[in-house]
Image (cartoon, rainbow, N blue to C red):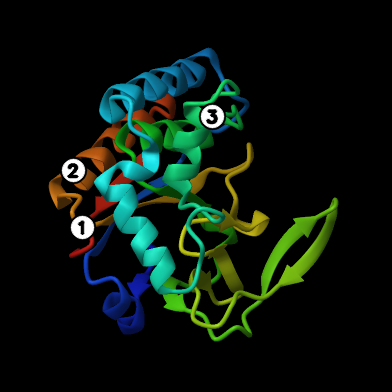
Amino acid sequence: MTLSLTVSDEVRALAPGFTHVAVEAHGLVNGPSTEGSSALLDEAARRLAVRLDGRAPQDDLHMAAWRETYTAFGSKPSRTRNSAEALAKRALSEAGLPRINLLVDLYNALSVAHLIPVGGEDLDHIQGGMRLVRSTGDEDFVTVAGGEQTVEHPDPGEVVWRDEAGVTCRRWNWRQGPRTRLTEATTSAVFLLEGMAPLPVPEIEAAAAELAELLEKFSPGARIAVRSATS
């Protein structure tokens, strides 16, 4: 069954230039990072450096649009960066990009190469559909702090992804909760590519197609469907 993804009217009013593309995949094979996924991360960092041509990630027009949107719902974008900007900063540092697991490496590489926020959610741990909403402040966000599970609550008005059980990602795409994170046991997932104007819609669709090709390469036989924001 196809996962339901909805964007609330309040979020659309806040960010009328927002668009997203979903890549839903079943029959995936995950595991530890490989030489292949590591090479993709290194190549993504090189593509990013060419794209930025000496500029800081936040000076990219797409990243600047995300910063404006974060500010509009009360977040400080220099402290809570969108996921693409945070990864780009890592990619350009001496530390480089982290190696997490095969599937996460693939979507992180795609995110960095295109400078587009990309998230991955384990479909077997999503309850009901996923909704992008402005928080009331009462929703549960289950996370881990100091090695112990704890429950946080988003700020009122904060933009969050959530399902029937609670928040899956805070501050739009800043921090994902462990409940729906992709692990080495994941076999079904949805990947969300998120864009803001002035990023052209065909560019985010091309990135989604590239991710679908990578998933097919690393998980032969997986069933993959790409859904644009209008489908």
The location of residue 20, given as percent across then percent down, is: 29, 58
The answer to whether any part of residue 142 appears in the image is yes
Dot 1 lies on which element? loop
Mark 3 highlights which residue? 102
The location of residue 184, given as percent across then percent down, is: 63, 36
Q: Quadrant of residue 31?
A: top right
* Comparing labels 1 and 2, the label whose residue is closer to the camera: 1
- Which residue shows up at 34% across the image and 49% down it? 63
Dot 2 lies on which element? helix
Q: Quadrant of residue 126?
A: bottom right
- Residue type of the residue flagged with mark 1: Ala
Mark 1 highlights which residue? 197
Work out whether mark 2 precedes mark 3 in sequence or the reverse, and give the earlier one: 3
Dot 3 lies on which element? helix
- Residue type of the residue flagged with mark 2: Glu
* Comparing labels 2 and 3, the label whose residue is closer to the camera: 2
The location of residue 36, given as percent across then percent down, is: 47, 16
**Residue 198 or residue 54, whichever sits in front:** 54
- The disc label shown at residue 203, or none: 2
Q: Are marks 2 and 3 in contact (CB under 8 Å)?
A: no
* Comparing labels 3 and 1, the label whose residue is closer to the camera: 1
